[in-house]
């Protein structure tokens, strides 16, 4: 049983690293996208950002949650504060994504599809998106901190 737990832990750590890395990449992409991007520039940003979500961030986050939950069952560790902290971080991450980041992404898609999208609107949406990316990245980093240091 210990060997299974060790392999699950490996998968869990690797998937958390991919989750954090993918989300950090989104933050960097947002930061280097010109604030007055034309449709082509905005479309390129969206293509990369939308590629990272379903190809890296989504699968990595799902695998991190699944492997973590199975580790709790296999390792018989119960639900100490650090595990609850990680679960709460995942829920907050998802809520921010669904309620705040998805609408901003839809606004950027609309701006990229329209001729003559107002650069001020694009800059404002990119700034809001960047702020929420940073908040989510901090939440993930705090969850990783809790998993490593296991505060009681």
Image (cartoon, rainbow, N blue to C red):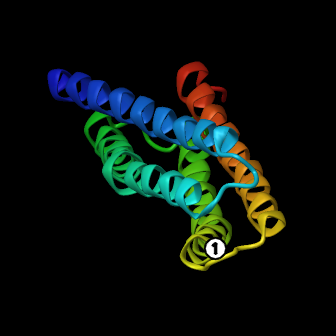
Q: Is residue 82 left or right of residue 44?
A: right
For mark 1, does the 10 Å Cα neighbourhood hold few (<14), some (14 to 19), or many (20 or more) residues? many
Q: Is residue 111 left or right of residue 67?
A: right
Foreground of the two, 125 or 58: 125
Q: Kindly tell me whether residue 80 is visible in this rendering.
A: no
87 or 60: nearer the viewer: 60
Q: Secondary structure at mark 1?
A: helix
Left or right: 53, with 130 as reference point? left
Reading the image, the residue beneath label 1 is: 111
Q: Is residue 126 above or below residue 1?
A: below
Locate the N terminus and report the quarter of the image it occupies.
Answer: top left
- Say which residue appears at 58% left-offset and 75% top-offset: 106
Q: Position of residue 62 (x, y in %)?
A: 35, 52
User: Is residue 31 something that shows in the picture?
Assistant: yes
Location of residue 152 in the rendering, given as x and y in whole percent from the top left corner: 66, 29
Q: Residue at x 48, y 32 (%)?
A: 21
């Amino acid at each position: 049983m210990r060997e299974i737990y060790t392999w699950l832990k490996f998968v869990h750590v690797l998937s958390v690293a991919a989750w954090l890395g993918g989300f950090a990449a989104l933050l960097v992409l947002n930061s280097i996208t010109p604030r007055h991007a034309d449709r082509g520039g905005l479309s390129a940003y969206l293509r990369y950002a939308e590629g990272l979500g379903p190809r890296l961030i989504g699968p990595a986050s799902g695998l991190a949650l699944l492997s973590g939950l199975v580790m709790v069952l296999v390792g018989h560790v119960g639900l100490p504060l650090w595990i609850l902290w990680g679960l709460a971080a995942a829920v907050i991450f998802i809520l921010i994504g669904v309620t705040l980041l998805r609408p901003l992404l839809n606004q950027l898609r609309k701006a990229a599809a329209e001729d003559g999208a107002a650069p001020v609107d694009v800059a404002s949406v990119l700034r809001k998106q960047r702020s929420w990316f940073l908040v989510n990245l901090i939440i993930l980093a705090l969850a990783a901190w809790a998993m490593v240091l296991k505060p009681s």
